[in-house]
Image (cartoon, rainbow, N blue to C red):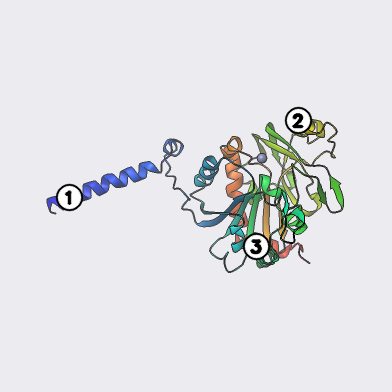
Amino acid sequence: MTRSRSVLSSLLAAAAVLAMAAVLTPDAQAQGRRMTQGGSGPIQVLLVTKGHAYDRENFFALFDKLGETITWTHVEQPAAQVFWDPKMAEPYDVFVYFDAMGRREMKLADGTMGFEAPPQKSQDGLEALLKFGKGMVFFHHSIAAWNQAWDEYSEVIGGACDWGNPVTKRGVDYPFSGYQPGTKQHTSVVPEAKGHPILEGLGDGFDIVDETYNCPYFEDSINPLLRTDFVAKPENFEPARRRDPNWNPPVGSNLEAWYKAAENSPIVYIQHGHDNLAWVNENFQKLMANAIKWAASEEALKWAKEHPQKIFK
Ligand SMILES: [Zn+2]
């Protein structure tokens, strides 16, 4: 080996070490694991955001932490709708939604004021994708997306929230939804769901500090996985009572996570996940990884095809 080549290889080796160090966070270093930005795991995830503020740095760090299981690609709405198409979605095993679109009244294409829904072409695309059987995981405020102007979308998820506007679902009027940030709670595994792959490693449940909701959840259309010990009665929601002292919806469901089918697709909803208080919780991370693994699995697709839920007419 010539002298110049050996200098070059030492430089390259040094650069490689520096590059390794650059992707190791203190957390990953402590655990002796390599953390790659965007992940390098076998499951391809399309991560959808927009329409609700969030702590970007820690949010993406959460998905990087799952990087041995997933490789993630981020896309915002409305560009995400390009992937509501079986062909375009082919490279992705599962969609994970953290968006909350369509919550503001705006001037619509026909000149009237109203809430936005995706164009018909996008709606047809999602229908085709769900009939095809693509797995989807929704969490936290994604349950608010499109609920004002697109009823089928709420049926895909299994519930509907809107913290700024009244909600009408299945012919019932509800006031605006409740949220209570930073709530210490215990989330328990529902006995009949014990042994489900989404609950693997969670024992009987776990403690978490996270935001809770009071919104209509469609208990008769979902399979429960987790329930919280927080009681979703109106007086437990300070921000809503501050805004309107007469705010008085029915006591909310204590569901925290469920699975269901939408057409032929396996669907998971996780209520948890407001911010980094929840994202650093190892049990939340396990739950998210399990949900993604399940929704992407052949087993889940088979289950959904055996228990299809008709949503689109
Ligand atoms: Zn939140």
Instruction: Give the CA separation, mark 1 to mark 3.
Output: 54 Å
Residue at x 41%, y 41% (from the top left corner): 24
Question: What is the secondary structure assignment of the residue under circle 2?
Answer: helix
Question: In the image, ligand 1 is in what quadrant?
Answer: top right
Residue 119's place in the image compared with 8, above or below, is below
Instruction: Give the CA separation, mark 2 to mark 3.
Output: 41 Å
Label 2 with label 3: CB-CB less than 8 Å: no
Residue 103's x, y, as percent?
71, 48
Of badges 2 and 3, nearer the viewer stands: 2
Residue at x 44%, y 39% (from the top left corner): 28
Question: What is the secondary structure assignment of the residue under circle 1?
Answer: helix
Q: Amino acid at mark 2?
A: Glu
Residue at x 76%, y 33% (from the top left corner): 237
Label 2 with label 1: CB-CB less than 8 Å: no
On the image, numbered disc 2 is attached to which residue?
238
* The quadrant where residue 221 appears: bottom right
Residue 269's x, y, as percent?
68, 49
Q: Amino acid at mark 3?
A: Leu
Of marks 2 and 1, which one's residue comes earlier in the chain? 1
Q: Quadrant of the N terminus?
A: bottom left
Question: What is the secondary structure assignment of the residue under circle 3?
Answer: helix
Instruction: Give the CA separation, mark 2 to mark 1.
Output: 67 Å
Q: Amino acid at mark 1?
A: Ser
Image mark for residue 301: 3
| Residue behind label 1 places its C-beta within 8 angstroms of ligand 1 | no
**Residue 128 versus residue 218: which sits nearer the camera?**
128
Residue 150's place in the image compared with 125, above or below, is above
Image mark for residue 6: 1
